Amino acid sequence: MGNFDEHLSAGKKYALAAIIISSIITYQLGLSTDNIILTAIVAAGFGLLTSLLPDIDHQDSKPRQAVGKYASIAIIGAVLLLPAMAPDFVDSVGRLVWVAGVSGDPSVLGSGVILIGGVAAIVFGGDLFDNSTTHRGFTHSFAFVFFVGIASYFALGLLMGVFPQLHFLSGEAGVVVALVAAGGIFVHLSVDGIV
Ligand SMILES: [Zn+2]
């Protein structure tokens, strides 16, 4: 188990990595220099924040099986509802796959990636949940990684409401930020020795 200082120091290193990685990706996507810098700042902020986030469940004593069951249902719901409720998000995920060299219809590719991610979160998340030697719950699971990725993308919508100059984050750059945010949970789990 990492203490707060260990998580903070890992989070700072991760934020630095997020600046570099997000800049490379947004440069590949052809964003303007201003937007590359803004994406890097937002990604670093989200990454630092999410690397600290899982310990909000410090006193959580809910039975793990029940939490795991609801998490699985919620993931299946998200996979089914996202293409209908957030088509831009799904398309953006699909266009990001283009960067990796795969071509195809963005909404189909995006749905595929989200489906694979959701299934992986349920399959591996359940194992991780049970094998984990910690009594900590949902916020220290793979399922939470998935949730934070989705939730961060919607949180960006709120941020864009406050800072209209960030509006470009409704596209692929926003998905990059969401991925960095999800990665922050991984960083936290690795400091805790769970992954
Ligand atoms: Zn923790």
Image (spheres, grey):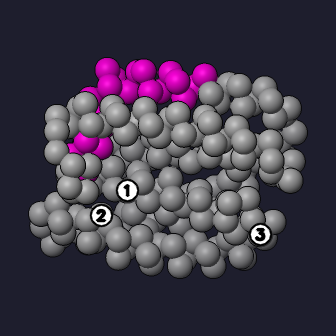
Q: Position of residue 74 (x, y in %)?
A: 57, 25
- Quarter of the image holding residue 170? top left
The mark total stands at 3
For label 3, the residue is 2
| Observer-nearest of 188 and 118 | 118
Task: Report the disc number at residue 177.
Answer: 1
Q: Which residues are magenta?
A: 73-96
Q: Which SS does the magenta portion mostly show?
A: helix
- Residue sitting nearer the eye, 53 or 72: 72
Instruction: Establish whether ligand 1 lies closer than 8 Å to the Cβ of label 3.
Output: yes
- The disc at residue 193 is none
Q: Earlier in the sequence, mark 2 or mark 1?
A: 2
Q: SS at mark 2?
A: helix
Q: CA distance from mark 3 to mark 2?
A: 29 Å
Note whether 10 is above or below 55 in the view shown: below
Q: Are the two marked residues, 2 and 1, in contact with CB atoms closer than 8 angstroms?
A: yes
Identified by mark 3, the residue type is Gly
Can the viewer see residue 169?
A: no
Asked if disc 3 and disc 1 are in contact, CB closer than 8 Å, the reply is no
Q: Nearer the viewer, mark 3 or mark 2?
A: 3
Which structural element holds mark 3?
loop
Judged left or right of residue 11, residue 4 is: right
| Residue under the point 51% across and 59% down | 183
